Image (cartoon, helix red, strand yellow):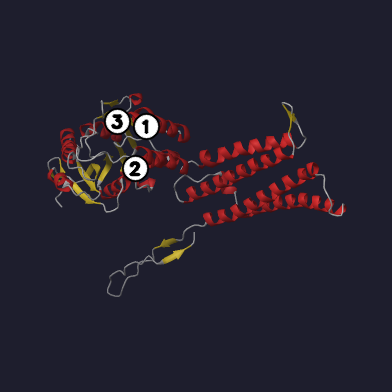
Amino acid sequence: MSSPKVNGSDASGPIELSVVMPCLNEADTVAICVEKAVRAMTEAGIVGEVVVADNGSTDGSQDLALGQGARVVDVPQRGYGAALMHGIEASRGTYVLMGDADDSYDFLEIPKFVDSLREGHDLVQGCRLPRGGGRVLPGAMPFLHRWFGNPVLSWLVRLMFRIPINDIYCGMRGFTRKHYDQLDLRSPGMEFATEMIIKSGLHRDSHGTSWSQVPITLHPDGRQAHPPHLRTFRDGWRTLRLFLAFSPNWTFFRPGLVLLGIGLVGYALALPQVKVFGAALDVHTLLVASLFVLMGWQCVLLATLARIFTGREGMMPPHEKLEHVTVERGLAFGIAAGVLGAAMIGAVVWRWSQQDFGALDYPQTMRWVVPGVTLVAIGFQTAMASLMSGVLMMQRSRRLDRPVVTMPDGAPMPAHRSQEVSP
């Protein structure tokens, strides 16, 4: 592997910028992308390197990249995100700029990303859409992506995560290596770029993240040998799935509150047999209302469990209010609800026994049985979810370095990371 070229000479001092390009059979374009990146850094006086993260190319892309002065990192794990993660890990710059090797992004625009990073921004997002001052040249973006996919997904990010980004799918962006290391990104596919944006937003308070956007021009894909790697519906769904995973509030909690509200309204109307537009709401309405209550409560419990898990794994900041949620409190609530429900059912059984287990007045007794069964189900769900929360709250043991022991000859004994303690 040849040494990377930095401003026309071999790298020996600190590197300010690492340009990382994922690559999979990009022989048509990788050389021009590397050449532009090197030229841009040289002309702007930026000490940098180009790292091409190759995902198993069979068309000679590696040699073409090396010939233009790039450093090539072989990445056996397939996937856009996997390639970028390995490339970024292998980079040596204080700042990192990522961009596709298909010549759709103009790497001559690198200096304006670096200028914004030097101003103190942690993440500098490129924007191709006119809304953010960008430009899309004719034929550079499919109609569905330009007018539906990108605008809608970017709008969802602004709505669900309060992140001021106009073009979430833009793959050309710069960031500090320190900020990247804080994010603990995990997505191996196309959703990697979206995960970076979402996690940057979720951790902005704890990390003090500073944002910036720069307008860029998107050019038509320069590849001729194969179509783009992006798959509209597959990768669009993966992005939406990522949104849902990182937003238990929108995925579970808010829908749960809506379902609970519908169910409780149903109870309020059915128990006193209120007539609505001439229709008498009775035990059948009560039964349907119970279904909504159970579904809503299940969503609330899932939101709680998901929030505990994402906070524990560092996917999201810990939720302050959930710190007061304990297994014991959940079990107490679940047992209380179950006992109350069982008492309501027991009252109907006692009444039945008083009538020698004969026929009952179902419209009246069902007003006790349906809420009773619902409370028992809620109690059971809550108790089981509380036990599961205890599993999720368990912390991994931490490893502590043993003290360095000096040997009789004066040499230190190598430290072994084998001592485990619980937090």
The crowding category of the residue bearing disc 2, from other C-alpha atoms within 10 Å (few below 14, some 14 to 19, many at least 20), is many
Dot 1 falls on a residue whose secondary structure is helix
Circle number at residue 141: 3
Q: Position of residue 16 (x, y in %)?
A: 23, 41
Q: Nearer the viewer, residue 269 or 77?
A: 269
Q: Is residue 164 left or right of residue 58?
A: right
Q: Position of residue 103 (x, y in %)?
A: 21, 35
**Direction front: furthest residue:** 359
Dot 3 and dot 1 residues touching (CB under 8 Å): yes
357 to the left or right of 295 = right
Label 3, label 1: how far apart the Cα atoms are: 10 Å
**Dot 2 corresponds to which residue?**
190
Q: Is 111 on the left or on the right of 144, as rendered?
A: left
- Closer to us: mark 3 or mark 2? 3
Amino acid type shown at disc 1: Asn
* Residue at point 35%, 30% (across, down): 144
Q: Is 326 rendered above or below residue 221?
A: below
Going from N to C along the chain, the mark reached first, 3 or 1, is 3
Q: Circle 3 — which element?
A: loop
Element at label 2: loop
Q: Earlier in the sequence, mark 3 or mark 2?
A: 3
Residue 177, how many percent across, how many down?
31, 44
Is residue 271 at all visible to an observer of this figure?
yes
The type of residue carrying mark 3 is Met
Q: Amino acid at mark 2?
A: Met
Q: Is residue 255 above or below residue 326?
A: above
Residue at the extreme bottom of the image, as rendered: 408
Of residues 388 and 55, the one drawn nearer to the viewer in this rendering = 55
Q: Which mark is residue 150?
A: 1
User: Where is residue 336 shown, x and y percent of the image?
Assistant: 71, 51
